[in-house]
Image: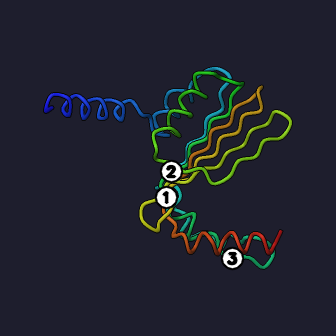
């Protein structure tokens, strides 16, 4: 019985060791030919302290505090790449992200995921697959669910 438990624990640990995060996916594909890669560090976001307010809509909420709270932004855009798609799907399957929205339209497939700790949203993952191109966007940072709900309400009001 002990051996079975030990084997099961080791199997779970080894599976989680192979799960990639957004940074490793970005690092793997960003230098490849035909791939556009954009990375913005948390330090760059925090430097926005002296910048003017970034409004949401004409009379909107100031987005600057939320942008300054970001820890990293990773974007990959490439011709459809089965390996990149597989790595992104493995990230989703790792259980870190929960699907919030999915749109399928004439071959285009858009999914938005979030990761959370308690009542804090700690990351967004956006995957767009249109069969000829693949877009991978991951934003890490912290925003409370309450603040996020306020931003969504404000965006809907200004839409």
First in sequence, mark 3 or 2: give its number: 3
Secondary element at image label 1: strand
Residue 115 on image: x %, y %: 50, 54
- Residue occupying the point 53% across, 29% down: 87
Comparing 111 with 21, the one in front is 111
- Name the residue tied to disc 1: 141
The alpha-carbon separation of the residues under discs 1 and 3 comes to 18 Å
Labels 2 and 1 touching (C-beta < 8 A): yes
Q: Residues within 10 Å of mark 3 (few under 14, many from 20)?
A: some
Where 15 sits versus 156, above or below? above
Q: Quadrant of the N terminus?
A: top left
> CA separation, marks 2 and 1?
7 Å
Left or right placement of residue 119 versus residue 159 in this view? left
The correct choice, above or below, for 3 with respect to 59 in the image is above
Please report whichever mark, 1 or 3, sits nearer to the chain's N-terminal start: 3
Residue 134 pos. (x, y %): 69, 32
Residue name at image x 31 percent, y 34 percent = 12
Q: Choose the circle earlier in sequence order: 2 or 1.
A: 2
Rendered image: mark on residue 61? 3
Q: Tell me where residue 153 sits by quadrant.
A: bottom right
Up-down relation of residue 44 to residue 111 (above or below): below
In the rendered structure, find residue 72 and report the number of the disc placed on it.
2
The secondary structure type at the circle numbered 3 is loop
In the picture, which quadrant includes the C terminus?
A: bottom right
- Outermost residue on the bottom side: it is 59
Choose top left, top right, bottom left or bottom right for residue 132: top right
Disc 2 crowd, CA 10 A, few/some/many (<14, 14-19, 20+): some
Q: Callout 1: few (<14), some (14-19), or many (20+) C-alpha neighbours within 10 Å?
A: some
| Disc 1 + disc 3, Cβ < 8 Å | no
Label 2 sits on a secondary structure element that is: strand
């Amino acid at each position: 019985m002990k051996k079975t438990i030990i084997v099961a624990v080791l199997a779970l640990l080894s599976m989680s060791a192979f799960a990639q995060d957004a940074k490793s996916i970005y690092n793997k594909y960003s230098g490849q030919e035909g791939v556009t890669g954009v990375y913005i560090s948390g330090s760059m976001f925090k430097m926005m302290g002296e910048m003017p307010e970034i409004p949401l809509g004409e009379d909107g909420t100031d987005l600057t505090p939320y942008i300054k709270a970001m820890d990293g932004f990773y974007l990959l855009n490439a011709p459809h790449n089965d390996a990149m798609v597989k790595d992104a799907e493995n990230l989703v399957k790792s259980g870190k992200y929960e699907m919030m929205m999915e749109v399928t339209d004439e071959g285009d497939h858009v999914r938005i995921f979030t990761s959370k700790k308690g009542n804090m949203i700690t990351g967004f993952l956006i995957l767009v697959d249109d069969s000829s191109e693949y877009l991978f966007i991951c934003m890490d940072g912290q925003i409370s669910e309450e603040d996020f709900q306020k931003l969504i309400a404000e965006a809907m009001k200004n839409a």
